[in-house]
Image (tube, rainbow, N blue to C red):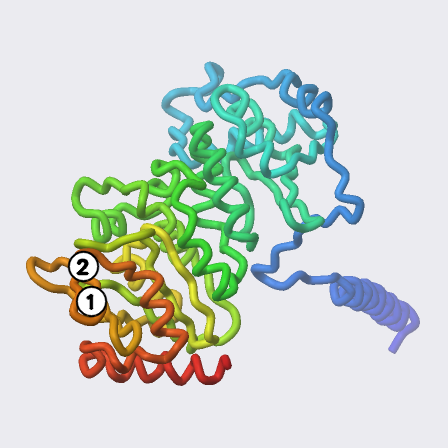
């Protein structure tokens, strides 16, 4: 082998070695890249939870933006394909984002966002890339992308209702959709769930109605879908269930609803008795019993009804449904129209005399369960 040939081989080997080294180094650099997990959502957390001032918000809203033109005059009508509505939306968002690249972020309470409407809301949506919304219960911010709030979140049900009521009153459809589809209520205790049935006047009927899907409204309230004011509390709990709310604690909690066979001749207040397997007794006003039972069962409760047409009071007196479905109070040989059903039924539960009612055999299993829970409570 001559010297020239040897030099050529050495040169070729050096070239191969050089490029091989570059490839190895490139591979090492690639291996050091930190890959994210697919679908992982990184939430911006501000430990200080600082919020922007009203002046900063106004400054952002007043920042001039050029409007996006999906069909600029310079384009050839033949050479350029017409954009779909989705393409127009995406390109509009990107077009505005580019103009706002040097603008500071504005951090708002979610309560502020849901209270916006009309032109102010539209202006804010155009500047969505510079908006962060603070979770009302956590030091956590979430982002807007156009008219979409990114992510799904959990918060207290009462907080959700307040946000939704504000969004409905301001006709903020973006916030309404966010509440209906991206918020899940925090778990509720048994006690809180039953006490939620007390309040029929906390929210407007139209607010609760619009929170329920149309098919649910038809199922529970008929074709006219009108919600009675007396059913607002039960409907709130129904909304809690439909939004994915759950009850924490004993999932096998038993509930017993005591109802009179007739409402004719009832004296005193109109509360309905609910007794739980923990031994607690509640007196709920204006309860829609069929609706309440359905809602409670949807939340995992073993809910049963006990209908009474006779209440034992003592050895000489009792209440009973008589002619034409009228309640009468009997005391010895005396018969008087009317009965204080609530007080006497509560007394019978606590004194464990339900088994002396004439309807005992019909509801024997449930009444025996109630008596056993009363014994445990004592």
Q: Provide residue 194's location: percent of width, then percent of height.
A: 43, 60
Q: Provide residue 103's location: percent of width, then percent of height.
A: 72, 27
Whether residue 221 is visible: yes
Q: Point out which mark residue 336 bears.
A: 2
Q: Quadrant of residue 300?
A: bottom left
Characterize the local packing of mark 1: few (<14), some (14-19) or many (20 or more) Cα atoms within 10 angstroms: some
Q: Is residue 59 left or right of residue 324?
A: right
Q: Please determine whether, in this image, residue 218 is positioned above or below residue 256.
A: above
The answer to whether mark 2 and mark 1 are in CB contact below 8 A is yes
Q: Is residue 90 left or right of residue 264?
A: right
Q: CA distance from mark 2 to mark 1?
A: 6 Å
Please give the name of the residue rendered at 43% of the width and 80% of the height, measured from the top-left corner.
374
Q: Please determine whether, in this image, residue 13 is positioned above or below residue 378.
A: above
Q: Nearer the viewer, residue 312 or 154?
A: 312
Q: Nearer the viewer, residue 63 or 245?
A: 245
Q: Secondary structure at mark 1?
A: strand
Q: Quadrant of residue 53?
A: top right
Q: Please determine whether, in this image, residue 287 is positioned above or below residue 67.
A: below
Please give the name of the residue rendered at 24% of the width and 70% of the height, measured from the top-left corner.
318
Q: Nearer the viewer, residue 218 or 369?
A: 369
Quarter of the picture holding the N terminus: bottom right
Which mark sits nearer the N-terminus, 2 or 1?
Answer: 1
Please give the name of the residue rendered at 53% of the width and 26% of the height, measured from the top-left corner.
121
Whether residue 12 is visible: no
Q: Is residue 306 left or right of residue 112?
A: left
Q: Point out which mark residue 243 bears.
A: none
Q: Secondary structure at mark 2?
A: strand
Q: Provide residue 185's location: percent of width, then percent of height.
A: 50, 55
Tally of numbered tags: 2
Mark 1 — residue?
330
Please give the name of the residue rendered at 64% of the width and 34% of the height, measured from the top-left corner.
131
Q: Nearer the viewer, residue 130 or 227?
A: 227
């Amino acid at each position: 082998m001559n010297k020239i040939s040897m030099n050529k081989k050495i040169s070729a080997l050096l070239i191969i070695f050089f490029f091989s080294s570059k490839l190895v180094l490139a591979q090492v650099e690639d291996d050091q890249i930190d890959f994210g997990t697919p679908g992982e959502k990184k939430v911006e957390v501000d430990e200080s939870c600082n919020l922007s001032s009203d002046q900063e918000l106004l400054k952002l809203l007043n920042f001039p933006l050029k409007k996006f033109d999906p069909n600029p005059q310079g384009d050839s009508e033949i050479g350029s394909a017409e954009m779909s509505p989705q393409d127009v939306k995406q390109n509009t968002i990107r077009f505005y984002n580019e103009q706002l690249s040097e603008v500071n972020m504005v951090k708002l309470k979610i309560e502020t966002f849901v209270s916006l409407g009309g032109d102010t809301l539209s202006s804010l949506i155009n500047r969505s890339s510079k908006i962060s919304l603070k979770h009302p219960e956590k030091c956590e911010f979430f982002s807007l992308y156009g008219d979409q709030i990114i992510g799904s979140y959990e918060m207290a049900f009462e907080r959700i209702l307040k946000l939704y009521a504000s969004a409905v009153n301001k006709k903020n459809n973006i916030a309404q959709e966010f509440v209906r589809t991206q918020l899940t209520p925090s778990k509720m205790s048994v006690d809180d769930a039953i006490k939620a049935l007390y309040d029929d006047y906390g929210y407007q009927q139209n607010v609760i109605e619009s929170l329920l899907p149309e098919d649910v409204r038809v199922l529970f309230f008929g074709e006219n879908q009108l919600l009675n004011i007396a059913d607002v509390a039960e409907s709130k709990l129904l909304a809690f269930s439909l939004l994915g709310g759950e009850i924490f604690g004993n999932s096998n909690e038993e509930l017993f609803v005591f109802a009179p066979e007739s409402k004719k001749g009832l004296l005193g207040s109109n509360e309905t008795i609910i007794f739980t397997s923990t031994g607690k007794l509640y007196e709920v006003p204006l309860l829609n019993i069929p609706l309440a039972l359905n809602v409670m069962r949807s939340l995992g409760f073993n809910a049963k009804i006990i209908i009474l047409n006779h209440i034992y009071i003592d050895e000489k007196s009792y209440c009973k449904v008589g002619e034409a479905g009228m309640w009468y109070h009997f005391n010895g040989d005396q018969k008087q129209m009317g009965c204080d059903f609530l007080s006497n039924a509560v007394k019978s539960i606590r004194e464990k005399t339900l088994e002396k009612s004439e309807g005992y055999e019909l509801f024997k299993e449930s009444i025996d369960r109630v008596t056993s829970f009363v014994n445990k409570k004592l």
